């Protein structure tokens, strides 16, 4: 019995050691973005009042103007997906000038819809070009931002800026390149990602990302008040620090 107990204890100790070792490795992984002083808030707009993507985009633009005027706020933006929550959305895409052969499915890349403030709030570095801007809502061609991995894989010997991408029936023009992030989890390798302008695909439900100058939790009342001042029917849910 004593021998069995010692053997069992040894197994548990080895297992605990391996678990701690794996955990320490994950802690040391660079996700490609910064979470210090970042507050996330889920927003739900009243769909009856904001029925179109353009109407929702206009409200978000006014929200960013109000939030950026607060002394507690450094950057604010929204996105459809929160990193490190297991999301793994992909979509087939191809270069317009290099279409896939007939009968061949285009490669899949990860995708996300966001505003320019999303990259600033999470300190995702801009490598080339520019971030999304308000003027993109009325641009004749939808803008897109790609990750470094996508740029290396599909634009190895040229600048991707100005090139057009096709995904399904839609096309977008590349306006910027940003750093890679680990989007699904810390054990997820950085990969080819495509970002679409939130102003063109604005949804009634989104996640607000706010980088604050101090304690992000303490800034939440001011954030909620600014949003409710624009429209008291906006639902401001689940404030969390990253």
Image (cartoon, grey):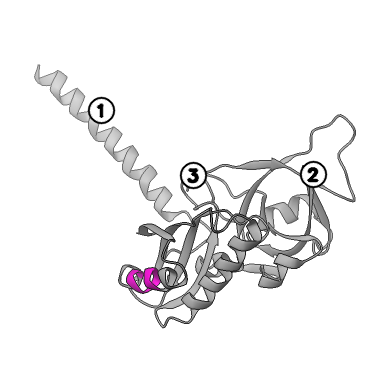
Extreme front residue here?
A: 48
Q: Which residue is drawn at 56% across and 55% down?
A: 181
Q: Is residue 36 visible?
A: no
Residue extending farthest left: 2
The residues tagged by marks 1 and 3 sit, at their Cα atoms, a distance apart of: 25 Å
> Circles 1 and 3: CB distance less than 8 Å?
no
Judged from the image, the secondary structure of the residue bearing numbered disc 3 is loop
Residue appearing at x 39%, y 43% in the figure: 22
Local crowd at mark 3 within 10 Å, few (<14), some, or many (≥20)? few
- Badge 2 is on which residue? 169
**Where is mark 1, residue-wise?**
11
Residue interval drawn in magenta: 220-225
Q: In this view, does 195 lie above or below 36?
A: above
* Foreground tag (2 vs 1): 2
**Residue at point 70%, 71% (across, down):** 130
Name the element at disc 1: helix
According to the picture, the residue beneath numbered tag 3 turns out to be 187
Where residue 101 appears, as percent x and y from the top left, is 89, 35
Instruction: Bin the neighbour count of mark 1 within 10 Å (Cα to Cα): few under 14, some 14-19, many 20 and up.
Output: few
Cα distance between the residues tagged 2 and 3: 33 Å
């Amino acid at each position: 019995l004593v021998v069995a107990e010692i053997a069992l204890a040894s197994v548990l100790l080895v297992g605990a050691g391996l678990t701690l070792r794996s955990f320490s490795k994950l802690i040391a992984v660079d996700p490609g973005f910064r979470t210090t002083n970042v507050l996330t808030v889920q927003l739900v707009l009243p769909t009856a009042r904001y029925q179109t993507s353009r109407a929702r985009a206009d409200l978000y633009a006014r929200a960013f103007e109000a939030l950026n005027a607060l002394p507690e706020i450094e950057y604010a933006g929204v996105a459809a997906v929160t990193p490190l929550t297991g999301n793994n959305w992909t979509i087939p895409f191809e270069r317009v000038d290099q279409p896939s052969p007939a009968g061949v499915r285009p490669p899949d890349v990860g995708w996300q819809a966001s505003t320019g403030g999303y990259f600033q709030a999470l300190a995702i570095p801009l490598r080339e070009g520019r971030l999304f801007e308000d003027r993109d809502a009325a641009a004749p061609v939808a803008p897109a931002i790609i990750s470094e991995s996508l740029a290396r894989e599909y634009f190895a010997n040229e600048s991707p800026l100005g090139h057009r991408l096709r995904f399904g029936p839609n096309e977008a023009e590349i306006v910027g390149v940003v750093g890679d992030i680990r989007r699904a989890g810390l054990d997820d390798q950085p990969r080819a990602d495509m970002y679409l302008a939130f102003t063109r695909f604005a949804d009634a439900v989104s996640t607000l990302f706010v980088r604050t100058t101090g304690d992000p939790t303490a800034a939440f009342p001011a954030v909620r008040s600014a949003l409710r001042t624009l429209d008291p029917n906006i639902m401001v849910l689940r404030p969390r620090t990253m």
